[in-house]
Every structure is written in C-alpha cells, then in structure tokens.
Image: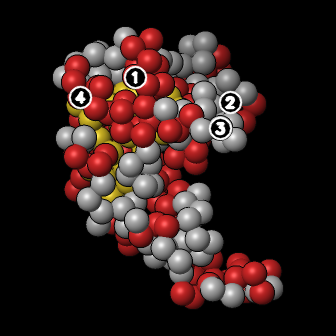
Amino acid sequence: MRTEDRNPDTMNLSEMSAQEVVDVMNRYDETIAEKVRESRREIAEAAELYARVIRSGGRVFYLGAGTSGGLALLDAAEVPPTFGLKEGTVIALTAEDGIRYLSDDEDDPEKAISQLKEHGCNENDFVIGVAASGSTPYVLAGMKYARSLGAKTAAIVCNENTPMEDAADLTMKALTGAEVLTGSTRLRAGTAEKMILNMLSTAAMVLLGMTWSNLMVNVIPMNEKLVRRAVSIIAQAAQCSEEEAEAALSETEGSVRKAIVNLIESKEK
C-alpha cells in the first residue's frame, strides 16, 4: 500500500527541528487538493445518490475505524445542526464505538454486520466505507453485508485496487501516497478523507434544498453563536435589519427558513 511506504524526503525526520517538520508537512499538504480533484466526478455521483436515498426515505451510513471513523463521526454529527436534517438520517458507525483508538476492533468483521443489523440497514439505505487502506476488515465486512441486502455502497480510500473498491458501487479515491511520518494516515490521507466528506455531504444537502443561495437557511440556532449566525442569515436573505431578523426568528420559534419567508411576504404585501 502506498500509504504505508516510507517517504524518502523525511528519512531524517527524527533529526529535524520543529520548523523543518512543519515546513515539510506543509509542502506535502499542498498536494492533497490535487489528489482529491481526480475523484470529482465520483464524489458528485455519490452526492447525487446520497440525496436520492434520503429523499426517498432511506438513510446514509458511514463505516470507519481509527481516524477514518472519527472523521465520519464528525461529518455525521455536523449534518443535523448545519442543515436541519432529522437525527438518525445520517449515521456514523465505528469499530471503536466512538473515538477510542486503543483497541483491535477494526479487525473484527462481525462487529460492523452486527451494528448494521441493529440499525435495521436495508435495501433503501446507502453505506459509505471510509478507510485510507481500503482494506479494513470491519469496514469491508459491513460494506459486503450492506450490498448483500441490496443497499448501495461507496468507498472513500487512499490506495489503488483495494478490496473496498470491489465491494463498492462507487469509489472515491485520493492517492495521497507516502506520509511524512510513515504509515500515519491521520495526516495526508486523513485530510483528503475530510475534504471528500465535506464535499459529499454539503453537495447532497444542497441538492436536497437545505440551502438558499449560499446561506444555511436550515441551520438550528441552538446556542448563542448559531443564533447570531441565524439572525445574520435572515437579515441577508430578507434584506432587513438585524433587529427585524431577530424578531422574526423569535416569532417562528427558531426556524430560519420560515422567518425569511415571513419577512419577504410581509414586504410584498
């Protein structure tokens, strides 16, 4: 696997100063977007499928272990408050039952199957495996099981010709190559996975109508920062003062979209 190769440019890593380590990491990080760019078409196709599954009442499952699982958890956790999607529509399952990396659960193929069964995964769902290696037993077994049910499957990987690619209807690859620190795929590979997940879920939510222009009109204002953001969004969309926006948000009990509609309609009368 290329992600496990030793990087010839960092053979003296343990002798480098902090500045030298930062500089070499920055130099290699500059190439990550180029690697992700090569899978733009597949990411867009996966986003269309993601949106189609949710629109028809299905769910999206992420499967991951280690860093990949942590990134999947983060993406799934951010979708409901950012886009107002009902919780339980996008579900991240990890080998470690969260972020607890000191375990060997990623080697347990039965665990993913058991978790998917508990959630009632079926042919209406979409299962996305995330693993830099493309061969993590936990992720691979879950994908194969989902496929046996008739569910659509996709893979996010950082190596060529992987078992996960064989188990996927669609594969998103970012061939990031050797890491600065050999085998530490939380670095370049992890960054690439995060970029792909960002594109995938954001594009899907746009297709589902969860945005207006480039504004998060379905954001859930559940804390002070998000209330301020919601007020700003309403003011920009309805072209009104922040005082008017705040009042409209209060009247709709926190619904940014309804507040915008109400303000626009009141101006048209």
- Residue that badge 2 annotates: 227
The part of the image, by quadrant, that contains residue 205 is: top left
Q: Quadrant of the N terminus?
A: bottom left
- Residue that badge 1 annotates: 113
- Residue that badge 4 annotates: 147
Give percent across and percent down for residue 100.
68, 36
Pick whichever of labels 4 and 3 is earlier in the sequence: 3
Residue placed most toward the observer, 217 or 15: 15
Q: Nearer the viewer, mark 4 or mark 2?
A: 4
Q: What secondary structure is marked by label 3?
A: loop
Q: Looking at the image, do the residues carrying marks 1 and 2 touch, with CB atoms under 8 Å apart?
A: no
Q: Which mark is residue 103?
A: 3
**How far, Cα to Cα, is label 1 from label 3?**
18 Å
Pick whichever of labels 1 and 3 is earlier in the sequence: 3
Give percent across and percent down for residue 192.
46, 60
Q: Nearer the viewer, mark 2 or mark 3?
A: 3
